[in-house]
């Protein structure tokens, strides 16, 4: 029977219940982390823990002193083992404010839930068939101090995903309130032109993805130039290649944007570098 962990205790998934006063349910007062499992162990945890610290600081949620990096990593891996995930898997860690009150919370204590599920692929695998994308036109993402964090307010991404589904494409690209293209519905965005990587800067309002950071670092280590900059629709039309990234899928290549078609040479190379790095340092 699949288990979850709530504040350090195992609970059967089928027996888990929601307290109606839960602030994540009432107000979306919290955030989440998606963490990849390879060979039955979570990877890139230090990157994720740093983002947890940064997000808790931004949202003013207090991390209990006993929840150290080592203890949280051990707890997540314990759940992975309990759920018999010996190869590839995905973990979702949801953190929210444990408090009563309305918009003004009565405390900043932290509550958390960990889920772990197996997935088909152990290491990162590039999609065989490229994805089709278009720009989501209805709502643009505001650029503010919360833009880079994975908060529980996901309405924009939900509506953009529905837009893509209704039009028979794989994903939507999100624009910020300045009109530049910043990300997919659950991914960061990269363009390739003349062997150089381009990706929106965090100042543009994209999520500060852990995989985004790892891809930038791995590219630089392999002497691939990377520029963080503003990207507009015209940049999509002249790019040689486009790919998306997140912590679970790794790299996902785009085959078409409207009438434009793309290659996937850099996507293949970076996926190979990524798996090599994981095998040598994390696996």
Image (cartoon, rainbow, N blue to C red):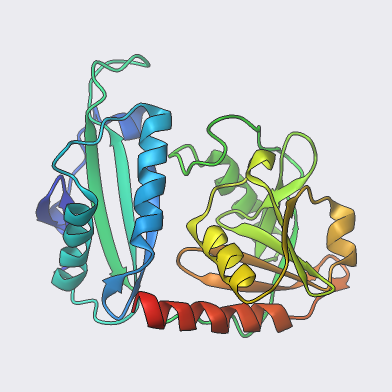
Q: Residue at x 54, y 58 (%)?
A: 213
| Number of marks | 0
Residue 15 shows in the view? yes
> Which of these two is toward me, 35 or 132?
35
Looking at the image, is 122 positioned above or below residue 230?
below
From the top left corner, tell me how far across and down residue 169 is, in percent.
70, 65
Which residue appears at 64% of the width and 83% of the height?
Answer: 269
Spot occupied by residue 211 in the image (x, y as percentages of width and height): 51, 62
Residue at 68 percent of width and 47 percent of height: 201
Give the left or right position of residue 63, taking residue 225 as reference.
left
Q: Quadrant of residue 175?
A: top right
Across and down, in percent, residue 200 comes to 70, 51
In this picture, is 199 found above or below 37? above
Which quarter of the figure is the N terminus placed in?
A: bottom left
- Left or right of 80, for residue 222: right
Locate residue 279, reporting x and y percent. Answer: 39, 83
Instruction: Tell me which corner region of the image, top left, top right, bottom left or bottom right, holds residue 131.
Output: bottom right
Where on the picture, by quarter, is residue 80? Answer: bottom left
């Amino acid at each position: 029977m699949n288990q979850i962990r709530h504040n350090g205790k195992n609970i059967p998934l089928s027996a888990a219940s929601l307290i109606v006063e839960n602030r994540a349910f009432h107000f979306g007062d919290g955030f989440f982390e998606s963490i990849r499992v390879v060979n039955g162990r979570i990877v890139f945890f230090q990157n994720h823990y740093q983002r947890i610290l940064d997000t808790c600081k931004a949202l003013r949620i207090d991390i209990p002193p006993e929840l150290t990096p080592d203890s949280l990593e051990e707890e997540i891996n314990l759940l992975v083992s309990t759920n018999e995930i010996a190869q590839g898997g995905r973990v979702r860690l949801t953190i929210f404010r444990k408090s009563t009150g309305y918009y003004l919370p009565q405390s900043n204590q932290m509550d958390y839930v960990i889920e772990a599920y197996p997935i088909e692929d152990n290491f990162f695998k590039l999609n065989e068939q490229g994805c089709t994308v278009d720009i989501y036109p209805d709502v643009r993402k505001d650029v503010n101090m919360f833009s880079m964090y994975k908060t529980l307010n996901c309405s924009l991404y939900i509506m953009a995903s529905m837009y893509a589904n209704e039009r028979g494409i794989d994903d939507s690209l999100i624009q910020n309130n300045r009109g530049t293209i910043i990300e997919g519905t659950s991914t960061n965005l990269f363009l390739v032109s003349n062997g150089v990587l381009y990706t929106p800067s965090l100042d543009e309002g994209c999520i500060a993805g852990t995989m985004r950071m790892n891809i930038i670092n791995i590219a630089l280590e392999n002497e691939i130039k990377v520029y963080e900059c503003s990207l507009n629709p015209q940049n999509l039309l002249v790019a040689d290649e486009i790919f998306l990234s997140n912590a679970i899928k790794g790299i996902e290549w785009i085959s078409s944007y409207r009438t434009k078609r793309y290659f996937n040479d850099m996507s293949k190379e970076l996926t190979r570098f990524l798996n090599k790095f994981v095998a040598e340092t994390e696996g």
